[in-house]
């Protein structure tokens, strides 16, 4: 087993934002392999998030982000369990980063359930027409449409999108990391994105 240096712990902490003891534990579990330790911490964050998922989120904050000299604006509401966390710097920074991400990516909804039915129907119709124009057999068309719809959800739904500041993780991964770090259930409740002429 390799020895875990303070430099390694710091490197992992800088990469993940996790606490010192969590970083040391992850490196110990992964024999000093930084990349494996990152995955270890991500899984731990997911487990913590799942444990907290059922807890109520009646507190929170509303943050805004204005981009391109006032051409794009976003307002986002993110909820948490306590007023204490609502005032926490990490929580507020997370909320601001989510607002900035929404300005950049223009998601259709937070999760697939939030995408309006007419948008899904329109996407399905386009995918169906494309498949038929390519001469695909009728029995394959539905599978092709489902595959393209899953890709659409990945690109259009906030929770599935790659985070603009770190494309290696999704917004869902980022949320789980923040839940693990702060220790409360956190939920992105709603957002509005405005664009001049949009």
Image (cartoon, rainbow, N blue to C red):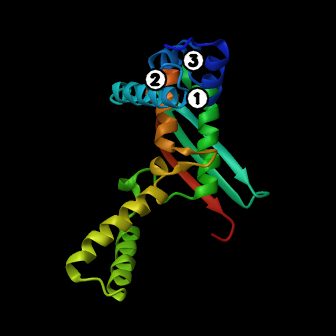
- Residue contact between numbered discs 3 and 2, judged by CB atoms under 8 Å: no
Find the distance from the CA under tag 3 to the CA under tag 2. 15 Å
Label at residue 19 = 3
| Element type where label 2 sits in the image | loop
- Residue lying farthest to the right in this orientation: 69
What is the quadrant of residue 56 in the picture?
top left
Ranked by sequence position, the earlier of labels 1 and 2 is 1
Q: Position of residue 137 (x, y in %)?
A: 24, 83
Find the distance from the CA under tag 1 to the CA under tag 2. 18 Å
- Residue 53 appears in the figure: yes
Local packing at callout 3 (Cα closer than 10 Å; few below 14, some 14-19, many 20+) is some
| Element type where label 3 sits in the image | loop
Q: Position of residue 151 (x, y in %)?
A: 41, 62
Please state which of the two labelled residues, at mark 3 or mark 2, is closer to the viewer.
Answer: 3
What is the quadrant of residue 135 in the picture?
bottom left
Label at residue 16 = 1
Q: Is residue 115 above or below residue 77?
A: below
């Amino acid at each position: 087993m390799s020895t875990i240096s303070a430099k390694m712990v710091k490197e992992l902490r800088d990469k993940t934002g996790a606490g010192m003891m969590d970083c040391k534990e992850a490196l110990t579990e992964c024999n000093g392999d930084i990349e494996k330790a990152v995955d270890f911490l991500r899984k731990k964050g997911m487990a913590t998030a799942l444990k907290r998922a059922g807890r109520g989120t009646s507190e929170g904050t509303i943050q805004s982000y204005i981009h391109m000299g006032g051409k794009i604006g976003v307002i986002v509401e993110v909820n948490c369990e306590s007023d204490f966390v609502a005032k926490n710097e990490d929580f507020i920074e997370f909320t601001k980063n989510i607002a900035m991400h929404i300005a950049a990516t223009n998601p259709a909804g937070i999760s697939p359930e939030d995408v309006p039915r007419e948008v899904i129907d329109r996407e399905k119709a386009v995918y169906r027409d494309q498949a038929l124009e390519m001469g695909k057999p009728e029995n394959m068309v539905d599978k092709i449409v489902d595959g393209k719809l899953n890709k659409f959800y990945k690109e259009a739904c906030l929770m599935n999108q790659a985070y603009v500041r770190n494309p290696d993780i999704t917004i869902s991964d980022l949320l789980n990391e923040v839940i693990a770090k702060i220790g409360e259930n956190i939920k992105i409740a709603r957002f509005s994105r405005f664009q001049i002429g949009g």
